[in-house]
Image (cartoon, coloured by chain):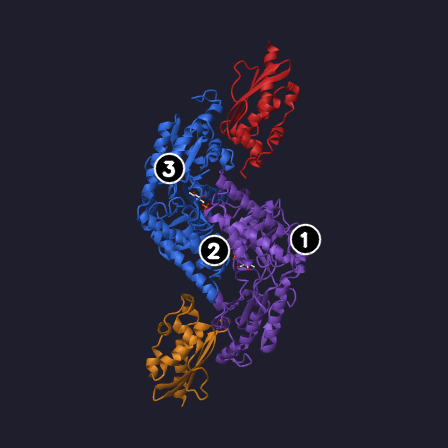
Chain colours: A purple, B orange, C blue, D red
């Protein structure tokens, strides 16, 4: 059976060119970049070259890039680091209700340490209102952290507009760009952000490596203490091969963006959305119709539950994801779907199909073809028929 | 490979005894839409024995498979014997469930108990 | 020119078998282990298999292994996590003066947060006295963190003896085993520790991946918050390939240890030490003569400075390291060499040669052969001749 | 490749003017053993011109190369001209130094200044 991967928001395959770039740094050029000898110096060069590529992709200066072990660490570092470094100035942080757990749980950790956090609401599309940010800022606010685009429903937030109100108030602004870096054009100066998190495995780089863009002059305390690596900003022997892979992934992403390759993905996504909405009843699209990530399609199918859809799709060779409780290891449906106003029983019936650079027209056709049958079969098992009657 | 045992996947793929029993002697409903699981178990009883059992389930793979499994397990059993079937026994009959599913989607035996209770209530009234 | 690598304490090459084991998890089996579909499930299996291998190497239960991005993160997690989780019980931590910066700087971070830290002295060999640990414990002590073996001078600490006094006091005991895992036999129950840090790139695994052994029941707060990965103990999409590599490295290390392969390294090390001490004047061996890591040889050559030795050796194809200020990016000589009582000017003249599994007898002979000439040449440049006269 | 420029490595490999001048007209010592750098610069002066310059250095590659470089730069220069040589100029003549070395091992010009000062003091006494 052909396997079709439509879960690119969860992780992407590592590009074969990326793997090729990494390979010499395992068993051949394996020096520690902090060593003076030639083994060390060749590793050091590779790390700095990668730093330049990452910086270039987002319009930053190489010295403003700090390598991390992924998006989660970058988020933790930005949020906790700013809080610890600026607590004399204030103890208030602003974020939204639809952030990734890496951000939400970092904020909750800080709440236990005595910080105060405002969780802004979103509209039915998942959009944050810059006016709400403005109203939430007090003289104790030290950080605003908002995601660039949502991992589940794909909505792209109005970062530039939010930046205006945040910068006017003289507050640090961090964005979680894990879902956008490499997928849409980004310029940190144009966006007006002080910090930006990214993660390699979301744009065809390796797992376990990411970066935090840290604008020059930003007051921050380390999350991971130890050696003097990364100019004393992030300790630990550098993941040389991983960093080289991240750099290569950035280079390839920049090429694709320059060539407008994401347009093909947008076209396939729109075809997928139309095909599903047209062929299936009691379905809704989640997220914004146009302000959304190129590859993201997210639906709720009423009267059935998400995991059962995933299993059924997997049996037909299609890899997808869902915001149902059962797929997250928690007991409640996705906080994101609840935040856009969906009742829990509907949120449990969500299906996320996220396309990548290698998905084909045929694959889209196949999914549009098989999905109606799957939904029908599962609905036949459901105690709800065309309405939620009987639901207490 | 996979999070579920082969037996679970078998029942998920081809669930047994799906449907409602129009003139059921007992109906049990368990679960919670917040959790994403609602099971409805229907039984038909004759001479103290369960002669038919059907289900409808809104829920994950484990919820569907356990529902299907219990309908098989109870058929022909006396109601007292049927009451003794535990959620754990259902999971075992399926070759086990992932740890995270043991508490949330493994409710079919509770649904059956409720259906039997409902049957008992109804019989009393008769 | 043949290149000879004798800096295995800094980093090791990734074993080609490890790289081979990792390869499928980049571009083929690239699923996110948290995904329900088959791509995710095959990644999940690989992660759990690696966990078993790591656990087996150190006599732990797989559920007690938490993957991290390396030794530094594991140290930070253990120390900060225990401190935060147990601050109601007490605010006192005990460590030593010769710990790695990952431990020392984590402790210093906590001091800024109001914790109190005792830094125990060591003797001239770098050994910690269990009696000192006992004396330092108060009813406010919540953690003792001591390194298993020192990265610079190779001294192996009396962990079992220290454990006895720590456990008697009912205090958590963490050891930094970054230099020992895979190099000497380890059993966490025999050693009597609650936590143990390891790092892949120190035993022929990949960079950027490590683990913390966390004894069941240990009260700890997360360092990195976010998703529910690693049973809610360490968030972030798993570095699948890296974890698989770590597992393979553990498996190979266990094989070598079972076969007693480290004995060859000990023999070469002792030959190297004897050769150098015999042929060069005004040199001393640092660390304990026998209680030391199989691969570690560390010397001080008087009247010259470490970096100049490294450059000279590098010109002859030999990769080594030093505890001189110039090689660490700091202004003072290694805190470890100072802690064993060396005056700074002598500490600056240190040279560390750390052997690995693939070093040969010929390589040892070569180094013994060329080193006297290098030392002689550098001493000819030095204003000090056979004594430190004139040094103010 | 490498942390140092080719020029630095050249001077490190084959340092110029190593040694002491027994009857030096001025000697300058800079550096700090705590830092791991001590330079001794010896000069011979004739008619206000530096006619010979030698060094001995305990220190890293940068310390040795800058010492070697300055001994080359000053030979034949008038002492006032020689005093104008800055540490930065020495680093530049070497094709640059790594940033971390700019402040700590780049002291040769200071050593030379001290040697010239020493010479001036001694000449006064004569
Ligand atoms: C929006 C967002 N933030 C953060 C993360 C965490 O990134 P990582 O898994 O690399 O730690 C993810 C993905 O998991 C994400 O989608
Ligand atoms: C004793 C010791 N602890 C901790 C570390 C840090 O490990 P890593 O570089 O993997 O973060 C090292 C090595 O750098 C070490 O030698």
Q: Alpha carbon of mark 3 to alpha carbon of mark 1: how far?
A: 59 Å
Judge from the rendering whether residue A268 lies leftward or rightward of residue B51; answer left or right. Answer: right
Mark 1: give few (<14), some (14-19) or many (20+) Cα within 10 Å.
few
User: Residue C115 in the image: x percent, y percent?
Assistant: 46, 44
Q: Is residue D94 shown above or below D1?
A: above
Q: Are marks 3 and 1 in contact (CB under 8 Å)?
A: no
- Closer to the chain start, of discs 3 and 2, is 2
Q: Nearer the viewer, residue D4 or B66?
A: D4
Residue A221 seen in render: no
What residue is at 44 percent from the left and 76 percent from the top?
Answer: B13
- Disc 3, SS: helix
Per the image, the residue denoted by label 2 is C239
Which quarter of the frame holds ligand 1?
Answer: bottom right
Chain of the residue where label 2 is placed in the rendered structure? C
- What residue occupies the far bottom of the structure in this picture? B126
Residue labelled 1 has its Cβ within 8 Å of some atom of ligand 1? no
- Disc 2, SS: loop
Per the image, the residue denoted by label 1 is A190
Q: Alpha carbon of mark 3 to alpha carbon of mark 2: how far?
A: 38 Å
Asked where in the image residue B87 lies, by quadrant, the reply is bottom left
User: Residue D93 in the image: x percent, y percent?
Assistant: 61, 30
Residue C240: image tag = none
């Amino acid at each position: 059976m052909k396997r079709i991967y439509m879960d690119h928001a969860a992780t992407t395959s590592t590009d074969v060119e990326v793997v090729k770039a990494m390979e010499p740094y395992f068993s051949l050029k394996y020096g520690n970049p902090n060593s003076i000898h030639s083994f060390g110096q060749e590793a050091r060069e590779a790390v700095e070259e990668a730093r330049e590529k990452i910086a270039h992709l987002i319009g930053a200066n190489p010295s403003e890039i700090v390598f991390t072990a992924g998006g989660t660490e970058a988020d933790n570092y930005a949020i906790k680091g700013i809080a610890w470094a600026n607590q004399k100035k204030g103890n208030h942080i602003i974020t939204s209700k639809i952030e990734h757990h890496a951000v939400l749980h970092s904020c909750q950790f800080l709440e236990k340490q005595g910080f105060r956090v405002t969780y802004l609401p979103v509209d039915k599309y998942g959009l944050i209102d810059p006016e709400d940010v403005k109203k939430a800022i007090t003289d104790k606010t030290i950080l605003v952290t908002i995601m660039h685009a949502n991992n589940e429903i794909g909505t792209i937030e109005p970062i530039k507009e939010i930046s205006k109100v945040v910068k006017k108030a003289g507050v640090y602004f961090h964005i979680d760009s894990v879902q956008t870096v490499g997928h849409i054009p980004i310029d940190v100066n144009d966006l007006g952000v002080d910090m930006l998190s990214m993660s390699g495995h979301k744009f065809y780089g390796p797992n376990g490596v990411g970066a935090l863009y840290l604008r020059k002059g930003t007051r921050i305390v380390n999350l991971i203490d130890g050696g003097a690596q990364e100019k004393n900003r992030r300790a630990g022997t550098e993941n040389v091969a991983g960093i080289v892979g991240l750099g290569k992934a950035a280079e390839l992403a920049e090429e694709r963006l320059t060539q407008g390759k994401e347009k093909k993905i947008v076209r396939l996504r729109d075809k997928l959305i139309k095909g599903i909405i047209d062929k299936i009843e009691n379905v809704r699209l989640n997220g914004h119709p146009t302000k959304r990530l190129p590859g993201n399609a997210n639906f709720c199918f009423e009267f059935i539950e998400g995991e059962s859809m995933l299993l059924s799709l997997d049996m037909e060779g299609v890899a997808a994801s869902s915001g149902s409780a059962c797929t997250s290891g928690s007991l409640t449906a996705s906080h994101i779907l609840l935040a856009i106003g969906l009742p829990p029983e509907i949120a449990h019936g969500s299906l996320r199909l996220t396309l990548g650079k290698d998905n084909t027209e045929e694959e889209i056709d196949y999914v549009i073809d098989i999905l109606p049958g799957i939904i029908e079969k599962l609905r036949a098992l459901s105690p709800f028929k065309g309405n939620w009657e009987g639901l207490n | 490979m996979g999070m579920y045992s082969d037996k679970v996947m078998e029942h998920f793929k081809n669930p047994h005894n799906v449907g409602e029993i129009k003139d059921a002697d007992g109906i049990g409903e368990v679960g919670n839409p917040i959790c994403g699981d609602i099971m409805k178990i229907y039984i038909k009883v004759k001479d103290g024995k369960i002669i038919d059992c059907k289900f409808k389930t809104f829920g994950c793979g484990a919820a569907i498979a356990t529902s299907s499994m219990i309908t098989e397990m109870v058929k022909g059993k006396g109601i007292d014997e049927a009451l003794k079937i535990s959620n754990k026994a259902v999971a075992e009959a399926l070759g086990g469930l992932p740890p995270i599913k043991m508490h949330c989607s493994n409710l079919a035996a509770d649904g059956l108990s409720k259906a039997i209770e409902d049957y008992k209530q109804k019989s009393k009234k008769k």
